[in-house]
Image (cartoon, grey):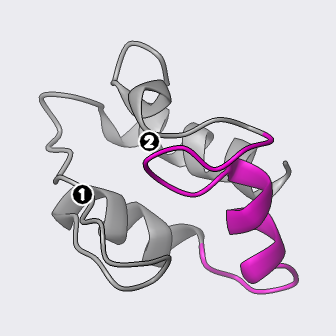
Amino acid sequence: MAKAGCMACHAKDKKMIGPAFKEIAAKYKGQDVVATLMQKVRTGGKGNFGPIPMAPNPPEKINDADLKAAVEFILKS
């Protein structure tokens, strides 16, 4: 995740520019949202956790396998 730049805006336990991983995990607890969140990371956007937009993250920045692993890690935080 550091290589892809996630940690520039996110941290595990505290809100930075983007939400903390634990905040994301709490919001989606018990839901099957891996594919949904992977798409959100790919396309970027705003509104889920406030007005600051998240930039898109194309496959050149993080491949599908690494993105899936990152989303699964975040949801377990």
Q: Quadrant of residue 6?
A: top left
Instruction: Classify 21 as above or below 47.
Output: above
Confirm whether the magenta stretch covers residue 11: no
Residue 68, image x, y percentages: 52, 47
The residue stretch that appears in magenta: 13-33
Residue 51, image x, y percentages: 32, 77
Q: Is residue 21 left or right of residue 33?
A: right
* Mark drawn on residue 42: 1
Using a 10 Å C-alpha cutoff, classify the residue at mark 2 as few (fewer than 14 neighbours), some (14 to 19) or many (20 or more).
many
Q: Residue at x 80, y 55 (%)?
A: 22
For the image, the number of numbered tags is 2
Q: Which residue is mark 2?
A: 67
Type of the residue with mark 2: Leu
Mark 1 element type: helix
Residue 45, image x, y percentages: 22, 73
Between 73 and 9, the one lying in front of the other is 9
Between 46 and 16, the one lying in front of the other is 16
Q: Residue at x 69, y 50 (%)?
A: 21
Instruction: Classify 77 as above or below 33.
Output: above
Q: Earlier in the sequence, mark 1 or mark 2?
A: 1
Residue 33, image x, y percentages: 61, 78
Q: Residue at x 85, y 52 (%)?
A: 76
